[in-house]
Image (spheres, rainbow, N blue to C red):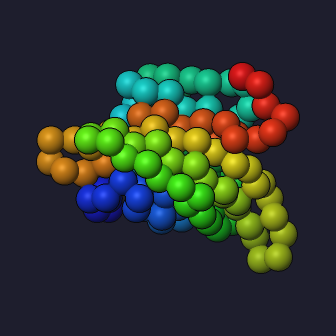
Amino acid sequence: MNLPKRAEDAHSALAAAFNTGDVATVLSMYDTSGIIVPEPGKPVSGRKQFEEAVKAILSIKGTMEIKTVYCMQTGSLAVGRSEWNITDGDEVKIQAKGIELMKQGEDGTWKIVIDHAFGAERYLIA
């Protein structure tokens, strides 16, 4: 899996990683010292918790699609807003609106530091 070289490609790269079904491939997209919110109101941090969160999401059988609503970059930081879903045929298994903070590494690739998968949902406060 090649990490994205442009911040605006992080969403499509993350969807491609999830669609491999491989935990290690998905984890390569993240800075696991950051935060992931795999379900509303339940942020986790640390490699073990990231791995558990990724496994839970991968257990939802289907294909992930992520639409980039916007991506704003300044220097080595970027914030993105996404609309994503996991579908199985015509059945929508899950869908949400997320917010992601990305950071560019010294090698020029981008990793997600904060992934609030439900961060742009209207009803969500935390």
Q: Is residue 104 left or right of residue 125?
A: left
Q: Residue furthest left?
A: 107
Along the viewing direction, whichever of 54 and 119 lies nearer the viewer: 119
Q: Which residue shows up at 51% across the image and 41% down it?
A: 100
Displayed quadrant of residue 3:
bottom left
In this rendering, does residue 81 appear at all? yes
The correct choice, above or below, for 123 with respect to 48 in the image is: below
Q: Is residue 76 left or right of residue 100?
A: left
Residue 4 lies, in percent from the top left, at 32, 59
Q: Dividing the image into 4 quarters, which one contains the N terminus?
A: bottom left
In this rendering, does residue 50 appear at all? no
Displayed quadrant of residue 33:
top left
Q: Is residue 95 left or right of residue 114?
A: right
Residue 7 lies, in percent from the top left, at 36, 54
Q: Which residue shows up at 19% across the image and 50% down it?
A: 108
Q: Which residue shows up at 27% across the image and 40% down it?
A: 76
Along the viewing direction, whichever of 102 and 45 lies nearer the viewer: 102
Residue 57 lies, in percent from the top left, at 64, 47
Q: Residue furthest bottom?
A: 89
Displayed quadrant of residue 52:
top right
The correct choice, above or below, for 11 with respect to 63 in the image is: above
